[in-house]
Structures are given as C-alpha cells and as structure tokens.
C-alpha cells in the first residue's frame, strides 16, 4: 500500500489516496488558466466596489481529462498533455466509483495570509475528525487532501463548514467550487504565476 511522505508532490499524493480508496473508478483532471485573481487586482474596499460586477465572473475550464484508476496510478507529469503559458492541470474532487456513485475527495485551499498552520489543523480536526490527510505547501497557499471520500449530498456542507470561522479560507474559492460542483487543487506549475509544485509539509 502506498504511503504519504514529507516532500511528496501533489500528483503522488493523489495516487496514495486512490490506492487507499478502492471504490474509486474514474478520476478527472481539469486544465485551466492561472493569473492574478480579482481580489489581488482590487485590494481596497473602494476598488472592489468599483469593479464589483467583475467579481461575479467564473473562469471556465479549458478542458477535462478522465483516467481510469490504473491509468492514473501510472501517470507522470511528462505524460500530461502540454499546456500553453499560464495554464495548469488541477485534479477535481469529484470521482466516479465502481458502482457509478459520485463522491468527492476532500480538498481545501487555505490562505496563510489570514491564519496560521496551527489554526488550519484545528479547523481540519473539527471538520474531518480523525480521518487521515495531508497538508501541502503550494507557494502562496496550503492545500489539504483528505484520505477518505465524501458522498455528494454531504459535500456542500463540508465546504460550507470551512467558511464559518471566516479566516480559514477565501470566500471566492468556496464560491467557485460551490458554483462548479467540485473542488480543484493544482498539480502542475506555471513559470509566471504558479512556479512551485505543491509538496507535502505535514501528514495529519
């Protein structure tokens, strides 16, 4: 059985989770553009109000790519379709199981500018209980992957729980994932905006 390791990249983290969750049948990757976001572009309240309509925009994925579990577990970065500048591959939380049921791998994107790693861990313990998972450093943020599955009718509540303390996650990230019906976390890099491959810093 595969194991989590400190320094492990996000792709290998996902392989560990899929190895540990034998009911997963199909995994989906999402290609999308990366850039400075609306919150970064409009940092003052006055500026946000001036450009409030732009804040409702949801960027659309460039493409999706599905893998059967055995295909995904053999996947390498070199085998991913090459993307253009300022485009990356992310994994979708939504997976199809062998009985065709849809479930979600628990994922979350934490803003370190708002809180500490210790606060993140307190929140994760409250929401996820004693389920195992990992924290990754993505450069600007920390990414969480849980080593368990959530039924689709429980997933919205899972996302909403992280909004309650108001400092753990960005409301825009939650808005995007609730709008899309799935979470995504980045696997690959972009030289300009996302130069760091996310790597494990804590095993929970």
Image: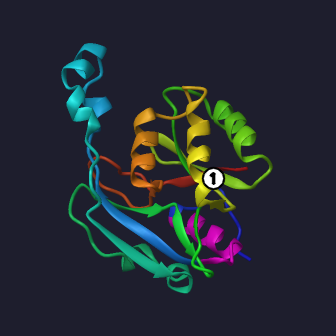
The answer to whether residue 176 is left or right of residue 71 is left
* Magenta-drawn stretch contains 18: yes
Would you identify the image quadrant in which residue 150 lies? bottom right
Task: Provide residue 102's location: percent of width, then percent of height.
Answer: 56, 69
Q: Which residues are magenta?
A: 11-24
Residue drawn where x is 72% and y is 47% of the image: 128
Q: How many marks can you see?
A: 1
The answer to whether residue 175 is left or right of residue 26 is left
Question: Which colour style is shown?
Answer: rainbow
Would you identify the image quadrant in which residue 20 lies? bottom right
Secondary structure found at label 1? helix
Say above or below: 2 vs 136: below
- Report the residue that reaches farthest toward the top: 46
Q: Tell me if residue 106 can be seen.
A: no
Say above or below: 42 vs 81: above
Q: Quadrant of the N terminus?
A: bottom right
Say above or below: 3 vs 136: below
Disc 1 residue crowd, few under 14, some 14–19, many 20+, Cα 10 Å: few
Would you identify the image quadrant in which residue 126 lies? top right
* Nearest to the observer: residue 192 or residue 118: 118
Residue drawn where x is 62% and y is 37% of the image: 161
The residue that disc 1 covers is: 154
Task: Provide residue 31's location: percent of width, then percent of height.
Answer: 32, 64
Residue drawn where x is 56% and y is 39% of the image: 160
Q: Main secondary structure of the magenta part?
A: helix
Task: Provide residue 34's location: percent of width, then percent of height.
Answer: 29, 50
């Amino acid at each position: 059985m595969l194991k989590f390791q400190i320094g492990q990249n996000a792709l290998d983290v996902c392989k560990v989770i899929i190895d540990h969750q034998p009911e997963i049948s199909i995994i989906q990757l999402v290609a999308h553009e990366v850039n400075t976001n609306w919150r970064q572009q409009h940092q003052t309240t006055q500026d946000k109000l001036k450009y409030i309509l732009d804040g409702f925009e949801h960027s659309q994925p460039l493409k999706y790519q599905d893998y059967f579990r055995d295909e995904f577990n053999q996947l390498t970065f070199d085998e991913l379709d090459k993307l253009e500048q300022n485009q990356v591959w992310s994994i979708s939380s939504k997976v199809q199981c062998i009985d065709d049921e849809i479930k979600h791998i628990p994922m979350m994107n934490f803003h370190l500018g708002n809180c500490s790693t210790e606060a993140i861990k307190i929140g994760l313990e409250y929401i996820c209980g004693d389920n195992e998972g990992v924290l990754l450093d993505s450069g600007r943020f920390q990414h969480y992957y849980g080593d368990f599955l959530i039924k689709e009718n429980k997933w919205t509540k899972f996302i909403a729980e992280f909004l309650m303390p108001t400092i753990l996650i960005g409301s825009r990230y939650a808005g995007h994932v609730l709008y899309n019906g799935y979470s995504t976390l980045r696997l690959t890099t972009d030289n300009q905006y996302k130069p760091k491959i996310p790597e494990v810093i804590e095993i929970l």
